[in-house]
Amino acid sequence: MPSAYRPGRPEDIPGLDQAALRDRYLVQGLLTPGEVRTVVTHFDRVVAVGAVPTDAPLALEAVPEIRSERFLDHREIGIANVGGAGAIVADGERFAMAPEALLYLGRGTKEVVFESDDAASPAAFYGFSAPAHAAFPNALATPADGTIRELGDQATSNRRTLRQVIHEDGIRSCQVVMGITRLHEGSMWNTMPAHTHDRRTELYLYFDLAADARVVHLMGEPDETRHLMAASGDLILSPSWSLHSGVGSSNYAFVWAMAGENQSFDDMDSVPIAAMR
Ligand SMILES: O=C(O)C(=O)C[C@H](O)C(=O)CO
Ligand SMILES: [Zn+2]
C-alpha cells in the first residue's frame, strides 16, 4: 500500500496494466479484523479509515501524514457500519451503531473508540474523512434515517435504493457527502448511465457481496475506460476526472462518499452510454 495515494493524470491510464491500475485506484484489506487501517490520499486530501474491533475496542489515532496531534483536529469524518452491530464512543458519548448506521463526527472531536457487540460477528467501520474549516455537531443516522432516492429500473437491471445521509438537506458537514446505495435483487448495475463530477473526488466501498462474487467497476475518462474487479470490502478511489460505475455478478451494496469544491449531489456531468469507449 503506498504511503499516500495520488490521483494521477488521465493521460497515464492507457499505459497502465491491471496491476498498476489496481495499485493506484483499488485498496484491499481496509477492513481487517482487530485493526484500524488508514489510507491517506491526495484526492481532495481524503483519508479513508477501516476499523474492525473484535475482542478489544480500537481507537482512532492521528497518522503522521496529517501533521496533527489527533485525527480530527482539522478534519471531519463520516463513518458507516458495514458489519455486525457495534458502537462508537466519541468524547465519552456512546453511539449505538446498527448495521448500516452512519455517524458524522465534526472537527475537534478528541477521542474516538470503536467497539463490536459480538466479536464473532464484528462491526466493520468504514470512515471517510476530509479537511474541515468549521465544527459541525456530531450526529447519528440510524439505518432508517436519510433521504431515500429510488433509482433505475428492473428492466435495465439497475433498480437500486440510494440513501443520502450526510448532505445539504441531511446531516450537515463542511465537505463530506455520504450515503449508501443497495442494489435490488436481480439488479446489478450501479450508476449507469455513468457520470463524472470534475469538482469532487468520490470513493466507493463495495460490501455485502458473496466471497466468490465480484463487481466489474468501470473507471477512467468516458472515452478511455478501464475496469477493476472489486470484491466485498474493496475500496475504489475515483479522481474527479474519472467516471465510476459497476456491474456485479450478483446484487450488492456500496458506501459512496465525496469531498471537494461543493456538496451539490446533482452537480454531475452525465455520460451517455453510447459515448463511452
Ligand atoms: O447508485 C448510484 O447511482 C449512486 O450511488 C451514485 C453515487 O452516489 C454517485 O456517484 C454520486 O455522485
Ligand atoms: Zn459520482
Image (cartoon, rainbow, N blue to C red):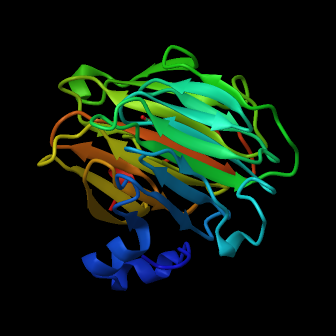
Q: How many marks?
A: 0
Residue 37 in the image: state x and y as whole percent.
Answer: 48, 61
Q: Is residue 66 above or below residue 262?
A: below
Residue 214 in the image: state x and y as whole percent.
Answer: 19, 50
Q: Is residue 80 left or right of residue 258?
A: left
Q: Nearer the viewer, residue 218 or 23?
A: 23
Q: Residue furthest top?
A: 144
Q: Residue at x 41, y 29 (%)?
A: 117
Q: Determine if residue 246 is in view.
A: yes
Residue 55, by quadrant, is: top left
Q: Is residue 274 left or right of residue 86?
A: left
Q: Is residue 256 above or below residue 261?
A: above
Q: Is residue 234 left or right of residue 35?
A: left
Residue 77 in the image: state x and y as whole percent.
Answer: 66, 46
Q: Residue furthest right?
A: 134
Q: Residue at x 31, y 47 (%)?
A: 246
Q: Residue furthest left?
A: 212
Q: Nearer the viewer, residue 247 or 133?
A: 133
Q: Nearer the viewer, residue 272 or 49?
A: 49
Quadrant where the image shows the N terminus: bottom left
Q: Determine if residue 269 is in view.
A: no
Q: Residue furthest front?
A: 56
Q: Residue at x 24, y 21 (%)?
A: 154
Quadrant where the image shows the C terminus: bottom left
Q: Is residue 131 left or right of residue 225?
A: right
Residue 270 in the image: state x and y as whole percent.
Answer: 51, 44
Q: Residue at x 17, y 37 (%)?
A: 250
